[in-house]
Amino acid sequence: MNHFELFGLPVNFELDNASLAITYRELQRSLHPDNFANNSERERLLAVQKSSQVNDAYSILKSPIQRAEYILAVCHEDIRGEQQTLQDPMFLMQQMEQHERLEEIPHSADPEQEIADFDDELTLSIKAYLQEFNKLISAEHYNDAANVVRKLKFVCKLQTQLSTLEDSLLDY
Amino acid sequence: MALLQIAEPGQTAAPHEHKLAVGIDLGTTNSLVASVRSGSAETLVDKTGRDILPSVVHYTTDSVVVGDDAAQQAITDPENTISSVKRLMGKAFTDINTTRIPNVLVESASGQPLIKTVAGELNPVQVSAEILKALAARATETLAGELNGVVITVPAYFDDAQRQGTKDAANIAGLNVLRLLNEPTAAAIAYGLDAGQEGIIAVYDLGGGTFDISILRLNKGVFEVLATGGDSALGGDDFDHLVADWISAEAGLVSEQSLAMQRLLLTEAKHAKQALTDNDSVEINIALEAVNWQGILSRTTFEDLIQPLVKRTLLACRRSLKDADISKDDVLEVVMVGGSTRVPLVREKVGEFFAQEPLTSINPDKVVAIGAAIQADVLVGNKPDSDLLLLDVTPLSLGLETMGNLVEKVIPRNTTIPVARAQEFTTFKDGQTAMTIHVLQGERELVDDCRSLARFSLTGIPPMAAGAAHIRVTFQVDADGLLSVSAMEKSSGVSASIQVKPSYGLSDNEVANMLKDSMTYAKEDVTARMLAEQQLEADRVMESLIVALQQDGKALLSDVEQSAIETAIQTLYQIRQGNDRDAIEKEIETVDKLTQDFAARRMDASIRKALQGQSVDKV
């Protein structure tokens, strides 16, 4: 049973987050191990497994990037865990520039503002890539869609690094 | 017994008997026990009417005293009086700043701290078990019956070793743990159910020894933790230490102080702190040994002392909001929990940070125990129609050591539990036949900066070229936040697994031995208890099968299957009446195998039902 089936949904990139959340709560209401506190060991174990599966599916489906990657895995090929294979000099060049920008932040006059601005830009570019992905996957252009997901992963990684930098500047 | 009725189709089960369940707040400074009685949750009091039990244990050669009576021995017999033991739980000896502990600590062979007393060298788990026993005894007496189960609260930011230690302590105290519940979540239940709230709430929990911040979404009885953060070594005790240091400096005391002087300073510091909640200044007198000092501590000076610690808590709040992807404006309500939130500076700064007046309507000392009692009542089965559902998260990332002393995260912090995640690894040498799996917890990238939870080996991998083996390591975290890890080489099916027993925790054998040593069971036969536990498990198996057959037998089973299961239940029932523990265990296994399919079908059916109910709602 794939994650979409588990939630009774068609395999589709666009989905309604509010109703996804409702379905999630309904599923956990009947499967969460707390409902089985007085049951046999076997049933408790089974509940832990099923409930874990629902949590996993939910975390993937509600995150647009993970959902994109997952749809690709269901429809075409699984690129999760692959080594980087993106061949797009323009994009890679841009990535290098952005990494330089990231490294400069601690030395800038107002690192906090710089982080916020950079983060906003990355969020916008993620949004644009997701729209592009949606078009490509609907048209069944899987290879192009896969390349968009690869780019998304680069941008997301950058955003994570940015947030780690923010944490370290704030002395966590 | 109702059991025999099952063979008669159409017969209803015996009406639900009320089961006894309590919630226990096992705190650093104080502990409480609460229960739902005639519909409302309340804390249980001792003979003198007090509900707060100081988490202090005093040992003599032949007795153990817990609570106020123990606390009175703190200055006269500091070596044998143990307070704030929670701060030692699940820690390595090397983790501990021993100058901060007014006891004599020694290191065990496995690197754990042991407290030296006249009653021997004690593990923090054993000491915690004494506090649990005292609370359980109070509950058994007040509720007039044996407890069916308990919910014990732990700081949300407790790591695996600290959680496992708490569970081991309950085990030694002879308690059936229904759930380890995170303290902020418990507080949210107490508040949320009270007010029927919907929306985002933040729980700021500053106790004696720990700080937690949790961000939750409340929706129709579902408490979904979005993020949690904190510091498992920051609390009111640290305020006391800062004040004690200040007194030492002002009074010109030597740095090497006697245990009695350390205790006195801490006690006076705590009193001063508490007095400053309602006063602008407080007079402090220290008269012990050759010292005779008087001085005045103003609230302003006190606030200067603790300011850096309060700031640290606010940084954690900021990070949790970010993890939850929530802005401050989204927070509908801020709930204050823990005695240390009485400090005016804490209230003021938290209020400033969230730009709203924090909620303090429920006594911050009691709110956690009350929430735990509500959850215990539901879990034990007294409220079959309850809407309450808790979805908690892992407070810290879990990962594995990889090449170059780096940590590869398998489950990131703030992932909803229960959760199972797998990661694939490969061998790095030709012909490699074994692999060491090192499990770590923490946010940092380097192995040395994270908490080592466990190491185990996967052996017997068939020799292959480097990189050809596919080793799948699976992490499973249950609803209590406890981790188990398994590893398997895919092509050969060679596997290894462990229930993570933290490096600084107790082994199963040690727990069993402590159980045997513990006073309660010294006179009793340990085997009798093990038999009773097996019988209880048999009862659970039978009871849940009976209910399952009534609900779904007709729909999901053929007549042949149904009667096979009924026969198996009858057999188990007969064997359970005897006193052969192994035979009962074996028969449970048989029933288990026979009903495996049925259980799986029921799970699938409930998924379908959940989805159906959903689509009907939408229409």
Image (tube, coloured by chain):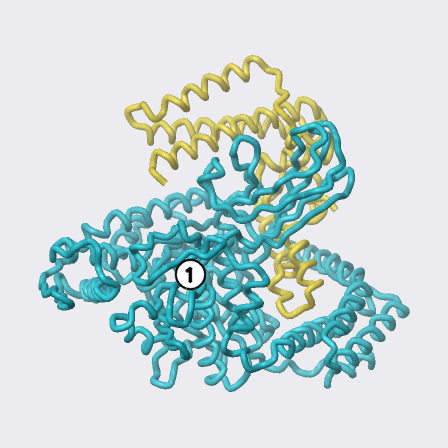
For chain A, the rendered hue is yellow
Image height of B571 relative to B445, above or below: below
Q: Nearer the viewer, residue B106 or A25?
A: B106
Q: Image point 75% across, 73% down: which residue? A: B584
* Colour cyan, chain: B
Query: In the rendered image, which quarter contains the N terminus of chain B?
Result: bottom right
Say left or right for B179 vs B568.
left
Image coordinates of residue B143 in percent, x first then y, are 49, 84
Image coordinates of residue B72 in percent, x first then y, are 28, 75
Q: Image point 30% across, 48% down: which residue? A: B353
Q: Seen from this angle, which residue lies furthest right?
A: B560
Tell me the crowding category of disc 1: few under 14, some 14 to 19, or many 20 or more residues within 10 angstroms, Cα based: many
The residue tagged 1 is B114
Image coordinates of residue B280 in percent, x first then y, are 13, 61
Image coordinates of residue B300 in percent, x first then y, are 15, 54
Q: Chain of mark 1?
A: B
Residue A57 visible to an observer of this rendering: no
Q: Secondary structure at mark 1?
A: strand
Residue B182 visible to an observer of this rendering: yes
Image height of B376 relative to B253, above or below: below
